[in-house]
Amino acid sequence: MEKTRPRRARPSYAGYFRANISDKESITSDNDVQSEIVDGSSSSNIEDVEDAEEALVLLDDDGDLQVSNPVASGAPGPVAGNGGQSRTRNSKRRHSRQNKSFVHDTQGLQTVPQPQRLGQSARNIKPKEHRYRPDSIWSSKSDTLRLSRRPQPFNPPFLVPTASTSDPRIAYRVKKSWMYSVGPGPCWELIEDRGFFKEEYIGTMAGTGRITRPLVYSETSHLLGYCKELLLGQSSRYNVESQPVSCFVGPYGAQDLKEIDQFSSVPTGGSLSVMFNSGGRITAVDWCPTTISASLGGRQYLAVSSTNNAFLGVGTRSHSPAMIQLWSINPARSDEALEVQCEVIMCIDEGAVLQLKWCPLPSHSEGERKLGLLAAITTDGAAHIYVAPMLGDGPLGSHHMRRVHCRPLLTMAFDETTCQALDWANSEVIAIGCSNGFVGVFRVKDAILGIGNAPLTHYFPVHQTSVQSIAWVRAPPGISDGTYDLVGDPTVICTTGSEGSVRVTDIRDCMSRMLFRNREVPHASAFAAFCGSLVATDVDFSVKLFQLQPTALGMGHSVADVGGTALALSVSDIHPYVAIGCADGSCITTNLLRGTRREGVVPFLNHKVFQLDYSPRDGHYRMLDRFLPVENGANEAMVYKESVTRNANNDKVVANTEDRFKQGCLEASGLWHPNVAVTAVAWNSGCGLGCAPFLVSGTASGLVRVDYLEGMWAKGTVPYGSIECIRGEDGQVEEEGGIEADSE
């Protein structure tokens, strides 16, 4: 009979987070406005390795955390969200499962035991190895770079070379260490760039070297004629009419009502966090990839698209004046917040922007006054590539906002359909999803350089209905001899359709394979390079992860439970955190490489960065932040328990929604005011390792929020003792139990 592993004592969750709450501060919770919040931002709760408690952290073969001075054993409750009740496994069900290790069929033959699995079954994985963590599809064999000290925003990071995760022993330790990152953002010790772009390997020695995020299209003098400065009177028809937004900002219980005019900003009260008003419903946001250079001054740049049309239909072909806003984010004059300013308004005639994405590699040029190349899908039914003009060079506030008319450098359109979604494979290839379910692939390099056209290389059917989202699997194509073509373009595309299916297609045969299907429209999807997996929105207010490795294709699990429909997703090439924008006005982050067992020492935590509330009675918004983290699934269990109670006669009584809400029970729902929805989120992946914690979120109200989310270790202690031990820089990396299971 198969024996289960004995349970061990585990420390309380309360030791992971330390809240220094003063008497003057108010407190906020996810379920109840009378609960506690963490004082200040997440960065104030992070302890340096030198100041951490002297506790020896060891990782055993099963992934448990052993502390030399553990907290007294007991049934710990989740951090927040279930009224202090712990999530324990039913003892009778566990006993029954242990006694039925082998199932006898009608012929009396023993069959293999059926383990409890987290998602779909994987035929190529041994039954005993059902506990797994997602793994990268591919890792570069050349050495990579990591941070040697905590990064400071807007300052050049301190980088040191380190061993690549192509070594399975190092990959196992790195993947296992990410499990103990329990903050709202990534821990700086482990972040590294795992994105694949063939431009990084072109010109290197036999493809073994790597130039991280090289500058592309730096000498394109013919692009200067696509932008023209406009006078104030000439740009009036491009303006979006907007009213000031009234929003309560600050700690709960001590919030102040702020009138936020268009193109103005206010601090949110936390460190390295700011909010501004774009003037209309946000349809897309994205960070401009840049290199750390003196010419850009360490600033970060945002592209924001907004519109007053709240009902943008599928398959429209309407031309109208619209604008794309370019914002700069600067270090604040004080240590309290960031400072932002709208410096350039790109005026276009192709209609409102449905989606926009920068060229994933830096493409700016100081001499030609070019900030980069920006691809956008507009309401005229086509996809365009624009040249974004360079912003001002002076200090913040030293110049007025420029208005520039921009003509498309390149237009990609189809006669029989309209464009709905796009994604860059690298600086040369773009994939476009259409409203008729087809996908087209364009090669745009020659057209950008002005030496040719942009040929349509592939055009094939994928979905029965409109394509909702599209994402390239950024990995080098494999060769028959078992090696990788490092200078080749990616060949695998993931798409979601309005019929509810998520499909994977290799453009070498153009045959789509269904990954999974649900009863709801998957609004967003993204490829996570750290996990080698596809992250997509799912039915029943959840977000799921599905692996793309051949040995675990289609295997997945839920990564987050949200209070409203998930509308937007964002992942990073530099860390394994995913950001989720929801219809209930909340922005949630969670770690994709968390522990493999729900009853493990490290809980499955969802971090709510903020939640926007709206009162239709007086038209005021309310920005709530500094929430305690919530264990994944805690709200669902609490609602089920509190919704059915018993009276004095022991009769079942079903409480109504209002009573459950007053008791602090949150119930997932799709009935939220449309103005509070978080419609766009984006991690900063193209500006170096030091800028990876930057997260931008856009809402339907026109408010955009920028946060710098730093991470923290469980118990404040780095696994394996130090980052040098994790990366094998001390030269002592031994084989560990379970490495074969995780690397298969």
Image (cartoon, rainbow, N blue to C red):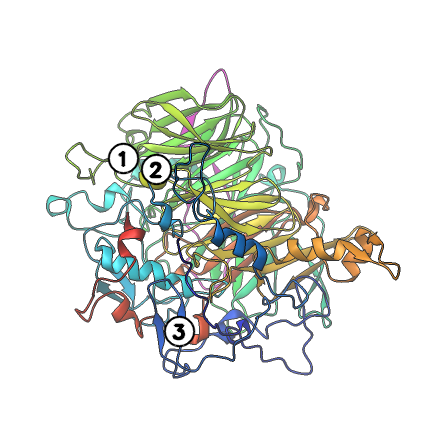
Q: Which residue is mark 1?
A: 489
Mark nearer the N terminus (1 vs 3): 3
Which marked residue is nearer to the observer: mark 1 or mark 3? Answer: 3
**Mark 2 Cα-neighbour bin, 10 Å: few <14, some 14–19, many ≥20:** many
Q: Nearer the viewer, residue 615 or 167?
A: 167
At x 41% / y 55%, what residue is drawn?
A: 576
Q: Is residue 517 above or below residue 557?
A: above
Three-letter residue code for mark 3 = Gln
The CA span between labels 2 and 1 is 7 Å
* Bounds of the magenta segment: 388-417
Q: Which mark is residue 66?
A: 3
In this rendered view, identify the residue nearer to me: 352 or 491: 491
Q: Is residue 298 visible?
A: no
Label 1 sits on what residue type? Answer: Asp
**In the displayed structure, does residue 448 sit left or right of residue 256?**
left
The CA distance from mark 1 to mark 3 is 44 Å
> Does the CB distance between marks 2 and 1 fall below 8 Å?
yes
Asked if residue 411 lies in the magenta stretch, the reply is yes
Question: Which of the marked residues, 2 or 3, is nearer the chain's N terminus?
Answer: 3
The structure residue drawn at horizontal position 77% and vertical position 62%, both measured from the top left corner, is 663
Q: In the rendering, at what x and y percent does residue 648 appear? A: 88, 62
In 3D space, how far apart are the residues under numbered discs 2 and 3 (Cα atoms)?
Answer: 43 Å
Is tag 2's residue or tag 1's residue first in the polypeptide sequence? 2
Determine if residue 52 is in view.
yes
